[in-house]
Image (cartoon, grey):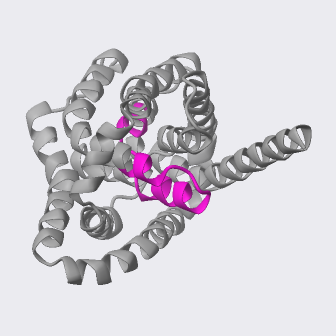
Amino acid sequence: MQIDIMTKIVLPLALFIIMFGMGLGLKKKDFGALFISPKALTIGLSCQLLLLPAVAFLLAISLNLPPELAIGLILVACCPGGVTSNLYTYLFKGDVALSISLTTLATFISPFTLPLILHFAMEQFSVPGHEFQLPIIKTISQMLIITVLPVSLGMLFNHYNSLISLKIEPIIRRFSSIFLVIIVLAIIYKNAEQMLGFFAASGIATFTLNISTLLLGLFFAKLSGLSHKQQMSIAVEVGLQNGTLAILIASSLIKNSVMAIPGATYSILMFITGYVFCTLFNAHENKQAHTLKKLQS
């Protein structure tokens, strides 16, 4: 995968703007929402921080992925959710407050958990003559700059310029997913000749990670007796990770283009699988509600 101006400049800048936009939309009441539904929040966060990396490790081992692709897959699983999960939750009428709360918490926690899990993965998947190293403290500081800093700046700007924030935040939110699609398409274009090879190498792994975590998130949410809206929010938040952040970390921080491949294929697949999942989930829930209504009448 080519590491060029797209991954060095455009991708970091776009992510900074998107994360800044997320901060613009956060208010004190959003953090208050963290404690209104602690059960849903705990389940969602546990699935994101524990279940996702565990599933990625199992897939990497069971599919016998090459070391760099295995680490790249685990990297995707360690990234927080992003604007895509928030957008799908909003479009398909899930619990938006829960979705934003989960994304926010995961964004603030991931700079500390991601380097540790990734360091462990590099130790596990290193082979003689093919060792990987990750400076944990440096990676944590870089992750804080990439994720926490723009969100914090957005919140600070919103606090002192709330009227301006109200005007620009919806614009950034509307175009965030478009930015991501453009970035993904640009990466595909720049690596067109290699794209089939990328999917051959990591397509099955990233597709399986995406689908299995969507379904596992839904399973644990249902098992816990959460509402339909909360079930959708948790499933989407657990199943749709920030693949573009994974590309950025692999290409710019770790400086390993092969590790960026799972992030690239995941970013393409999740838009499709996320849309299909949400559509089927809503259709199933609407059918159940209609059947129940007929039985009661």
Instruction: Look at the image and tell me in which quarter the C terminus lies.
Output: top right
Q: Nearer the viewer, residue 165 or 188?
A: 165
Specify the segment rendered in magenta.
74-100
Relative to 160, is 12 above or below?
above
Relative to 12, is 283 above or below?
above
Q: Position of residue 28 (x, y in %)?
A: 21, 56
Prevailing secondary structure of the magenta residues: helix
Q: Nearer the viewer, residue 203 or 17?
A: 17
Q: Residue furthest front?
A: 297
Left or right of residue 264, residue 113 in this image:
left
Left or right of residue 286, residue 36 in this image:
left
- Residue plotted at (34% across, 46% down): 101
Q: Is residue 250 visible?
A: no
- Residue 80 painted magenta: yes
**How many discs appear?**
0
Q: Position of residue 79 (x, y in %)?
A: 36, 41
- Residue 14 painted magenta: no
Relative to 245, is 61 above or below?
above
- Residue plotted at (50% across, 23% down): 55
Q: Is residue 168 visible?
A: yes
Q: Nearer the viewer, residue 100 or 286?
A: 286
Q: Position of residue 64 (x, y in %)?
A: 55, 20
- Residue plotted at (62% across, 41% down): 228
Q: Position of residue 87 (x, y in %)?
A: 50, 61
Left or right of residue 148, residue 263 in this image:
right
Relative to 224, is 201 above or below?
below
